[in-house]
Image (cartoon, rainbow, N blue to C red):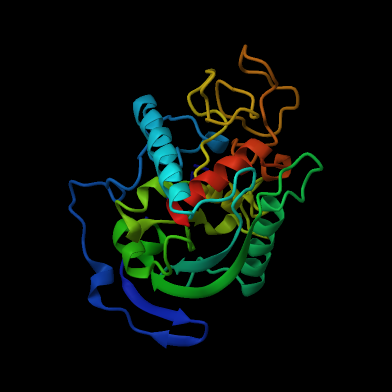
């Protein structure tokens, strides 16, 4: 996850110029004994958990046993789809044009907005990063993105990411192939769901992103739009490059060297693990500064293809 904050109630939603009034459901209260995000859809990190720039974890926790189970399930799904002629031809990779729905969660006074230009720039960043355009060694994943719609809401609770399961279920658009991005003001840079969780809870599928991290935003060191790239990587099925620490299994990708912990900043030559290779600090799935990010690897591209075929195609 990449971390940043709390407020009240539904007022209105603006659909590219047209104002609509939301139903009272948007202001449902949550139990005082239950944290705002303490639902099965999101892992809430313990205090002091290591994270991007000292921030909290951005996906739900995955045990080693669950990680192994996901790999086995994915292999079964790919085999079954291939038998039905649905899979990707051997040696090829999946590719798709992904519809992106931007949900701007402003507060009751309209604070927390972003411009249409920032949104356009954010889509361009996704196309650049997933297209392998930031480094000669970067993989082109074959996935492109287009803006399918922008909706602006005025709701202080939603702006602060309170009642997150409720507001996502009420506002999510499209099917399992659609990337929903909720722009909020919270204690993180971003939070994402995994593709294998879509079937269990489709209403919350997508990524939440700190609105100040969009291109031109005010999030120091994280305002080039690459928080969305990082979180979209999770949405496609990638783990952090430091998943599991200094182990051979690590992030399930062979060409991302193992690292024992996340990166902060852009420390060239960092080597936190005794296994071969320097830490992949330029990889979008580490916790580096936006200016440090340059690539997904071919192995990550293959994993994205497999996960898309198994869970989103």
Foreground pick, 61 / 84: 84
Can you give x and y, in whole percent of width and height, for residue 62 in the image? 38, 33
In the displayed structure, would residue 290 be above or below residue 101? Answer: above
In the displayed structure, would residue 209 be above or below residue 154? Answer: above
Can you give x and y, in whole percent of width and height, for residue 240 in the image? 54, 35
Can you give x and y, in whole percent of width and height, for residue 99 in the image? 54, 67
- Image point 37% across, 66% down: which residue? 156
* Residue found at the far bottom of this picture: 18
* Image quadrant assignment for residue 117: bottom right
Residue 189 visible (yes or no) = no
Q: Is residue 249 left or right of residue 60?
A: right
* Image quadrant assignment for residue 20: bottom left
- Image point 58% across, 68% down: which residue? 114
Foreground pick, 304 / 266: 304
Can you give x and y, in whole percent of width and height, for residue 247 in the image? 52, 18
Q: Is residue 83 left or right of residue 88?
A: left
* Residue found at the far top of this picture: 274
Foreground pick, 63 / 23: 63
- Image point 59% across, 52% down: which residue? 94
Residue 43 visible (yes or no) = yes
């Amino acid at each position: 996850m990449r971390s940043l904050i709390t407020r009240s109630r539904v007022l209105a939603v603006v659909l590219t110029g047209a104002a609509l009034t939301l139903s009272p459901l948007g202001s449902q209260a949550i139990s005082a004994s239950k944290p705002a995000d303490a639902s099965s859809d999101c892992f809430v990190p313990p205090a002091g958990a290591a994270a991007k720039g000292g921030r909290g974890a951005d996906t739900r926790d995955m045990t080693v046993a669950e990680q192994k189970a996901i790999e086995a399930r994915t292999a079964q799904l790919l085999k079954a789809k291939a038998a039905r002629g649905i899979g990707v031809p051997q040696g090829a990779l999946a590719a798709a044009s992904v519809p992106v729905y931007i949900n701007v969660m402003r507060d009751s006074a309209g604070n927390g907005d972003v411009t249409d230009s920032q949104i356009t720039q954010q889509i361009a960043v996704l196309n650049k990063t997933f297209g392998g355009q930031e480094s000669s060694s970067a993989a082109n994943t074959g996935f492109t993105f287009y803006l399918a719609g922008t909706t602006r809401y005025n709701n202080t609770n939603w702006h602060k990411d309170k009642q997150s399961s409720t507001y996502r279920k009420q506002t999510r658009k499209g099917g399992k192939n659609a990337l929903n991005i909720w722009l909020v003001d919270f204690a993180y840079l971003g939070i994402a769901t995994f593709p294998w969780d879509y079937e269990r809870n489709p209403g919350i599928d997508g990524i939440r992103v700190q609105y100040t991290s969009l291109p031109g935003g005010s999030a120091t060191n994280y305002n080039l739009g690459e928080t969305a790239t990082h979180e979209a990587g999770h949405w496609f099925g990638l783990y952090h490059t430091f998943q599991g620490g200094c182990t051979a299994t690590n992030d399930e990708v062979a060409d991302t060297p193992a690292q024992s912990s996340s990166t902060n900043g852009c420390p060239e030559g960092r080597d936190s693990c005794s296994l071969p290779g320097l830490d992949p600090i330029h990889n979008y799935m580490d916790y580096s500064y936006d200016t440090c990010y340059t690539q997904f690897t071919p192995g990550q591209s293959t994993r994205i293809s497999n996960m898309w075929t198994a869970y989103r195609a």
